[in-house]
Structures are given as C-alpha cells and as structure tokens.
Image (spheres, helix red, strand yellow):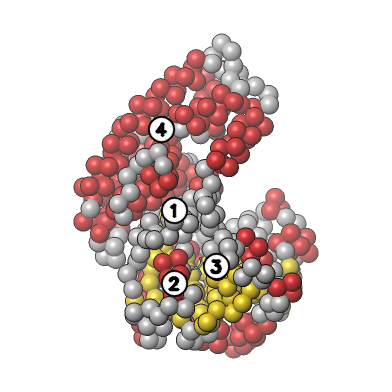
Amino acid sequence: MTADEIRRIFLEFMAERGHIVIPRAPLIPKDDPTTLFTGSGMQPLLPYLLGADHPAGARLADSQTCLRVQDIEEVGDNRHTTFFEMLGNWSLGDYFKQEQIPQVWTFLTEKVGLDPARIYVSCFSGDPENGIPKDDESAAIWTGLFEKAGISSAQVDLGTEEHAAAVGTDGARIAFYGKKNWWCRGGKAEDMPVGEPGGPDTEIFYLFPTVEHDPAYGRHCHQNCDCGRFIELGNSVFMEYRRTESGFEPLPRRNVDYGGGLARIAAAAMDTPDVFRIGLLWPIIERLQELSGKTYEDETRAMRVIADHLRGATFLAVDGVQPGNKAQGYVMRRLIRRAVRFAFELGLEENFFPQIIPTIAGIYEAHFPEVAEHAEYVERILVKEEQAFRRTLRKGLKQLNAYRATGVTGQELFVLYDTYGFPVELSTEEAERKGIAVSAGWQAEFDEQMAAQRARSQHPVPHT
Ligand code: SER
C-alpha cells in the first residue's frame, strides 16, 4: 500500500466516522508569533483545542504538512525528515479514549494491514507533583485489543528512558513512561507557558525485528530506544489540561489529538524501516541516482538530505517563503544550501534543482496540486539561491586551500561552516584529501562555536 493510498484511506475512514476533512494549513502559521513553522497537526487548531467552536464541528481530520528543523543535522538516518505529513484526527470535546484507541488500532491493523503482533505502545505513568494520574484507562483499552488479537499484553513501568535502557522491558507490549508521554507543543510540562494546552498521550510503535538493537543507545532496547528497532508511528494525545501559574487546570472540554506520521506508516506497510523508500521520497532518490550516476547504497546520507531538504524548500516556496537572512527565510536558505553542499559530494556541481522540482510536483499532484500549479515559480526562487550558493561554495573551497601552509583550527572550520556553509565533515575530509593539517583540539573549538551560534538562533518556543 502506497503513502498516497494510506492518506486517502485514512481520510475516508475518518469521514465514515463522522469527521469533516479539512485542508492543510500553510507551513507558516497564521497569527502565531511564538513559532516559525507549523510543526504538528494540532498547531493550526489551537484555539479550538482551547475551547472555541470549530465551524466544521467537533470531529475533524486532515493530513497536515509540517516542518521541524530543530534536528536538521539528524536528517540522514532512516527516519528523520524536516518536512513531513501528519495524519490527524480530532475530537473537540466529543469522543475520548474509549473510541480513539480502538479507532486507531482498526486503521493501522485492518485498513493499512500492519501486523498486530509488531505493534507496541506506551502510556503515561502519571505526574504526582501536578496531581495527574497514571493513564491506566488507556492501558486497559490496549490490553483488551491485544488480547482479542491473541497477543500477550504485559505491562512495565519504566519512568524515564534512561531507566528503560538500564532495565529493559522483557518484551512488554505496554510500557509506561513519565515525561515522555506528556504531550504539549514545547515538549516538556515544566516549560509550558501559562495557558498552553497539553495532556498525557499514548504512543504507537512498530517493531522491525531485522534491526538489531545497537548497544550504543543503551544496554536494553525499549519502545522509545533510538536504535531504530522500534519506530514511532503516531500518538493519541488526550488533551484535557491547561497550564496555570501554579500547575494545571482542566480544559473546558476533553479533546483527542491524534498525529500519525504518514511516511512512517507507509514504511511500516512496506516493511522497511527506511522512510526514504516510500513513494513520497523514492522518486527523488531515483532521480538523484540518475543524475549523479551514483547509488543510494553508496551515497545514502547525501541523497536523503538532498531529497528531504529540497522537498521542504519546495513547500516553503509554495507557501510564500523566500530565502533570506531572517526567520523562515533563513531556514529555507539553510535547507537549500545544505542540499547544494551535499550535491557537491555526489559530484553534482552544476544546477540540478530544475531536474528535481518537477519530480516533487509529480509526487504531490493528486493530493497537494498547489505544488504543480506553482512549480515554475518555485523553480525560479530555488534556482536563484542555488546559483548564488554554488559561487559561495567554490570560494569556500578556495578558502580552505589558503590554510594549506598553516593548517586549519576548529575556529576556522566553524567560519567555513558558518560563512561558506561548509559542513565540518566536508572540510575535514577535504583537508585530509589535500594534506592540510587539522589542529588536534578542533572538535571542541568547533562545538563551542556551534553551541554559541545555536543559542543565538533558537526558536522562541522550541517545538519537539
Ligand atoms: N499529536 C500530534 C503530535 O504528535 C500533535 O498534533 O505532534
């Protein structure tokens, strides 16, 4: 089943259950100065989760385009992307846990056809300090569903991820975590501004048994382990609290906020842990293989970064952003520059965006026709930036050569990164290739500069 089919089936399934399907909101939030991008499905619905009546009613569904750039450097593994689609369904004071959990189970196991025996979940273990109880109700609903499917439903209370990695789960289906299963836009209950809504969530993971646990991530694997053996497919947030000065108060209505990663669900349906293999990304990778004459197997990271970043930059252009030095424009510029830099690694030294943008427009033709409608405009904006940056990049390579006699320090590597957009691994590799010495303490110096720069460019509200 393809990602396009999964999106369609999800929206039809929700419509059959009385949900009104609403269009995606743009990547740039309207009237929300606290954040640069729409980073989750719930964000455009914030006023309604806080209690306002939505014109379309109390049951809504959509596939929301999202951008999260906090982990931009992590793009390159098998599942992180900056741009993604989040399948969403909401109950605004209508149904709650008893309907939501079986609903998402039916969607994943019957509609998408995922193997129930590979589904694992997590629930909230409670926050005694704030008087928020352990979510035994969700666990009991999951137990009923697992048992009906003939699957053992053992529970384990893990608390923190560190503790989970130390003690393991013994294969328990239902794992309780504390902070990890509290959902709010900022990520952490203690950082929530007054008035912000949040609540416990229950998360769904898919097991990829062919991926061996990597002890670099801790002694034992568990639902939230980052080794890639478990991949989170989505979560149901039971949004029923609002932050006050002293703790939490109940929201006027209890809401459900489901967010499912379309790419991850599609990858699970294909039984691959690599989201770049799905139909929303693979055509871009194929094009990159053709253009560079290199293979995905040999150039996995570079091809993943280029595919993700160009897709993100394309949607930003469709939604009206232009590359620049500030705010959203700066992020867009970073995406484009990173794509160009990684393209150099593939030997793609001439403009190649015009060869990729039509592929992206084709991928989204059926569901987001606005991409194809604006393809020429997108191409113009992106190519201008591509050309300018290629010139800069060439200058940066020249600058690196200037260190031939003296060797290069961490500080200078940072300047190359920051001013010329050179990824440090490209600089060090290039230096090694050219026999330019790199100072012994370069990494610490570089990291220090990087941390200072991050602190300068942080989001007002760091969404996770
Ligand atoms: N449930 C969503 C999420 O996980 C929010 O809409 O981000």
CA neighbours of label 2 inside 10 A, class few (<14), some (14 to 19), many (20+):
few
Secondary-structure class at tag 1: loop
- Disc 4: residue Cβ within 8 A of ligand 1's nearest atom: no
User: What amino acid is found at the position of numbered circle 1 in the picture?
Assistant: Leu
Percent coordinates x, y for residue 33 in the rendering: 44, 56
Q: Residue at x 32, y 45 (%)?
A: 322
| Residue farthest along the top direction in this orientation | 405
Disc 2 target residue: 47
Q: Earlier in the sequence, mark 4 or mark 1?
A: 1
Q: CA distance from mark 3 to mark 1?
A: 17 Å
Residue type, numbered disc 2 = Pro
Q: CA distance from mark 2 to mark 4?
A: 45 Å
Picture quarter with the C terminus: bottom right
Tag 4 secondary structure: helix
Identify which residue, 427 or 181, lies in the foreground: 181
Relative vertical location of residue 341 with respect to residue 58 in this rendering, above or below: above
Q: Which of the two labelled residues, at mark 3 and mark 2, occupies the earlier sequence position?
A: 2
Q: Which mark is residue 344?
A: 4
The three-letter code of the residue at mark 3 reads Glu
User: Which residue does the numbered mark 3 point to in the structure image?
Assistant: 196
Q: CB at mark 1 closer than 8 A to ligand 1?
A: no
Residue with the most extreme front position: 245
As measured in the structure, the alpha-carbon distance from the residue carrying label 3 to the one carrying label 4 is 44 Å
Name the outermost residue toward the right: 167
